[in-house]
């Protein structure tokens, strides 16, 4: 928890990395802290992007489906996630059990910029939205 929590604390008062335009404390921080689960698949996608941007591997693992979750996760410290674009969402609402989110995640690595485009699948597990898997496009 240590370094991820320190990084997350450094964003207090700043705009959330997920691109919502809200303050981090009002947007993804409650999900990262376990205080408020994501109400939709898109909200979970946004909170996971923020977790990647902040290096919060604990949250990434907690928000991953138990059948596809890796035992550990090591993020590349040289890769910086800088912007998220939601391209399309299908289902994944308050009353749905499944949903997909297609997104573009922009990053910088070794002085170069890049984009990861993926359609991610989300399902409810124990009543909470979790990331199941995804297909890179």
Image (cartoon, helix red, strand yellow):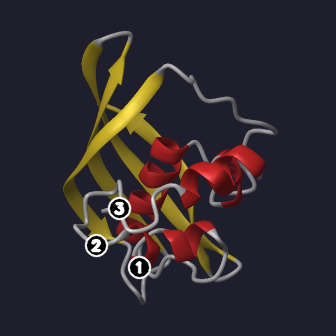
- Verify CB contact (< 8 Å) between mark 2 and mark 1: yes
Q: Nearer the viewer, residue 95 or 62?
A: 62
Side of 31 where 62 appears, left or right: right
Q: Nearer the viewer, residue 47 or 136?
A: 47
- From the top left corner, tell me how far across and down residue 84 is, in percent: 27, 47
Q: Is residue 61 above or below residue 90?
A: above
Name the residue: 42% across, 58% down. 45
Please, what secondary structure does the residue beneath circle 2 have? loop
- From the top left corner, tell me how far across and down residue 108 is, in percent: 32, 23
What residue would you read off at disc 3? 16
Name the residue: 67% across, 75% down. 34
- Verify CB contact (< 8 Å) between mark 1 and mark 3: yes
Q: Residue 57's quadrant in the figure?
A: top right
Side of 135 where 2 appears, left or right: right
Name the residue: 46% across, 70% down. 98
Distance of label 2 from label 3 (alpha carbons): 6 Å
Report crowding for label 3: few under 14, some 14 to 19, many 20 or more residues within 10 A (C-alpha). many
Q: Residue 30's quadrant in the figure?
A: bottom right
What residue would you read off at disc 2? 22
Please, what secondary structure does the residue beneath circle 3 have? loop
Q: Is residue 125 above or below residue 4?
A: below
Of callouts 2 and 3, the N-terminal one: 3
Farthest residue, direction right: 71
What residue would you read off at disc 1? 26
């Amino acid at each position: 928890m240590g370094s991820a929590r320190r990084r997350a604390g450094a964003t207090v008062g700043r705009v959330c990395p997920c691109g919502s335009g809200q303050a981090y404390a009002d947007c993804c921080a409650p999900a990262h802290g376990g205080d408020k689960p994501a109400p939709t698949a898109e909200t979970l996608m946004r909170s996971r992007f923020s977790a990647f941007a902040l290096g919060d591997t604990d949250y990434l693992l907690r928000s991953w489906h138990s059948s596809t979750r890796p035992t550990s996760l090591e993020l590349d410290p040289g890769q910086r996630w800088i912007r998220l674009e939601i391209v399309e969402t299908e289902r994944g609402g308050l009353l749905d059990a499944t949903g997909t989110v297609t997104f573009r995640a922009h990053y910088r690595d070794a002085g170069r910029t890049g984009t990861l485009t993926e359609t991610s699948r989300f399902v409810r597990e124990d009543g909470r939205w979790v990331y199941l898997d995804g297909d890179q496009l």
